[in-house]
C-alpha cells in the first residue's frame, strides 16, 4: 500500500463494509503548514471504544474470513514515520471518522498516487453510496458529489462507455486545475 | 472542460438515440478488500473500465466484493454471464484484462488456464 490514494480506497471500502451509505473524503494539501491532511467520515455502524483502541493493531479485524487486518495499521505506521498522526473517532451507531496527517515534505511520505483511479473505483463499484470528495490544494478546491452526478445521469449507468469517458476526463481536468493547470 | 451539465446533455442524447441498455448481460466482480487493493485491484478495475469505454461495451455491470479469504489469489475477478456459472479468475493483472474482456465477456469463451473456480447456481 504505497499510495495514500490506495488507503483512501481501502478506508472507503471499510466504511461501506460497515453499512455506510454516506462517505465524505476530505483531502487537504496545505503547503503553508507543510501538512497533508486526510479525513474520512461515514455513517456506518461505528465501533465501540474497545475496538477503536485496538484497531491499529494488525491482529485486530472485524472480518471473519481471516484474523489479520492491515489497512489501518499500515496507515498508522506511515503517519507516525512522517511526523503526523492517525485519529479515529467512532461510537456504535454514530459512524466513524478517520483523520490522518503527514508532514508533506517528509521523505518517507507516501505519494498521493492515482486519485482519478481511486475516485472512479469508488463511484463505479458503489452506485448506491452517497460519496463526497473534497480536495483542497492551498487556496484551490475541487468538490465532487455523487448525488449531483447521479441526478444528471438519471437511470443511465455509470459504466455506460460514453459516461466512463466523461468521468475520466472530468476528474483528470479538475485535478489538473487544482494543481495549477489551465482549463481546456 | 467537462462539466456535470455535459453529462445531462450526454444522457439526453443517448435517450434520443435510444441507446441506453438496462439489462446487464455480464456482471464483473472485482475483489476490493485490503488484500485485493494491495495486490493491484484498483489498476485491474481501471483496466476493465478502460476496455469497456474503448470497445463501447453497453451491457456490463461492474461491482466489487470484500476479502473472501483467498488473499493469496488476489486480484480476484469473477465473471457472470446470464444463465452461465460464475467463473473466478485468480492473480489477475491489468495486462490480462484485455484478453479477459475480449475472450470471455465479448465472445463467451472462458479463459480456462486462468480460472481458479466455477460456481454453478
Image (spheres, rainbow, N blue to C red):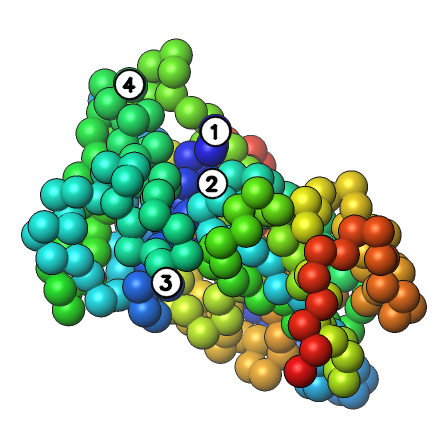
Identify the chain of the residue marked 2, using the numbered disc in the image: A
* Neighbours of disc 3 within 10 Å: few (<14), some (14-19), many (20+): some
Q: Where is residue A130 in the image (x, y as percent from the top left)?
A: 38, 68
State how far apart marks 4 and 3 are (Cα).
Answer: 28 Å
- Is the C terminus of chain A in the top left, top right, bottom left or bottom right quadrant? top right
The residue at the point 24 percent across, 37 percent down is: A57
Identify the chain of the residue marked 4, using the numbered disc in the image: A
Q: Are marks 4 and 3 on the same chain?
A: yes
Q: Do labels 3 and 1 share a chain?
A: yes
Secondary structure of the residue carrying numbered label 2? helix
Secondary structure of the residue carrying numbered label 4? helix
Provide the residue designation for mark 1. Answer: A2
Q: Who is closer to the viewer here, A10 or A107?
A: A10
Secondary structure of the residue carrying numbered label 3? helix
The residue at the point 23 percent across, 38 percent down is: A56
Q: Do labels 1 and 2 share a chain?
A: yes
Q: Who is closer to the viewer here, A118 or B92?
A: B92
The residue at the point 15 percent across, 48 percent down is: A52
Of circles 3 and 2, which is in front? 3
- Residue A81: assigned label: 4
- Looking at the image, is mark 4 or mark 3 earlier in the sequence? 3
Cβ atoms at labels 1 and 4 below 8 Å apart: no
Cβ atoms at labels 1 and 2 below 8 Å apart: yes
State how far apart marks 1 and 2 are (Cα).
Answer: 7 Å
Provide the residue designation for mark 2. Answer: A6
Secondary structure of the residue carrying numbered label 1? loop
> Horizontal placement of B11 versus A70: left or right?
right
Amino acid at each position: 500500500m504505497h499510495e495514500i490514494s490506495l488507503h483512501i480506497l481501502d478506508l472507503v471500502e471499510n466504511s461501506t463494509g460497515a453499512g455506510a451509505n454516506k462517505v465524505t473524503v476530505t483531502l487537504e494539501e496545505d503547503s503553508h503548514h507543510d501538512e497533508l491532511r486526510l479525513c474520512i467520515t461515514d455513517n456506518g455502524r461505528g465501533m465501540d471504544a474497545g475496538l477503536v483502541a485496538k484497531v491499529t493493531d494488525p491482529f485486530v479485524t472485524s472480518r471473519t474470513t481471516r484474523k489479520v487486518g492491515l489497512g489501518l495499521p499500515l496507515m498508522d505506521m506511515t503517519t507516525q514515520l512522517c511526523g503526523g498522526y492517525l485519529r479515529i473517532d467512532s461510537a456504535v451507531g454514530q459512524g466513524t471518522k478517520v483523520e490522518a496527517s503527514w508532514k508533506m515534505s517528509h521523505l518517507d511520505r507516501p505519494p498521493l498516487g492515482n486519485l482519478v483511479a481511486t475516485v472512479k473505483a469508488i463511484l463505479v463499484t458503489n452506485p448506491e453510496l452517497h460519496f463526497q470528495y473534497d480536495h483542497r490544494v492551498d487556496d484551490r478546491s475541487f468538490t465532487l458529489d455523487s448525488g449531483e452526478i447521479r441526478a444528471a445521469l438519471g437511470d443511465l449507468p455509470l459504466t455506460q462507455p460514453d459516461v466512463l469517458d466523461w468521468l475520466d476526463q472530468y476528474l483528470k481536468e479538475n485535478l489538473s486545475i487544482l494543481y495549477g493547470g489551465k482549463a481546456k | 472542460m467537462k462539466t456535470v451539465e455535459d453529462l445531462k446533455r450526454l444522457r439526453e442524447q443517448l435517450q434520443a438515440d435510444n441507446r441506453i441498455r438496462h439489462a446487464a448481460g455480464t456482471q464483473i466482480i472485482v475483489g476490493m478488500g485490503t488484500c485485493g487493493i494491495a495486490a493491484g485491484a484498483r489498476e485491474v478495475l481501471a483496466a476493465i473500465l478502460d476496455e469497456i469505454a474503448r470497445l463501447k461495451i453497453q451491457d456490463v455491470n461492474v461491482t466489487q466484493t470484500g476479502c473472501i479469504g483467498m488473499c493469496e489469489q488476489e486480484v480476484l475477478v469473477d465473471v457472470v454471464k446470464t444463465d452461465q456459472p460464475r467463473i473466478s479468475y485468480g492473480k489477475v493483472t491489468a495486462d490480462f484484462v484485455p484478453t479477459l474482456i475480449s475472450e470471455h465477456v465479448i465472445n463467451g469463451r472462458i479463459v480456462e488456464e486462468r480460472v481458479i473456480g466455477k460456481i454453478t447456481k
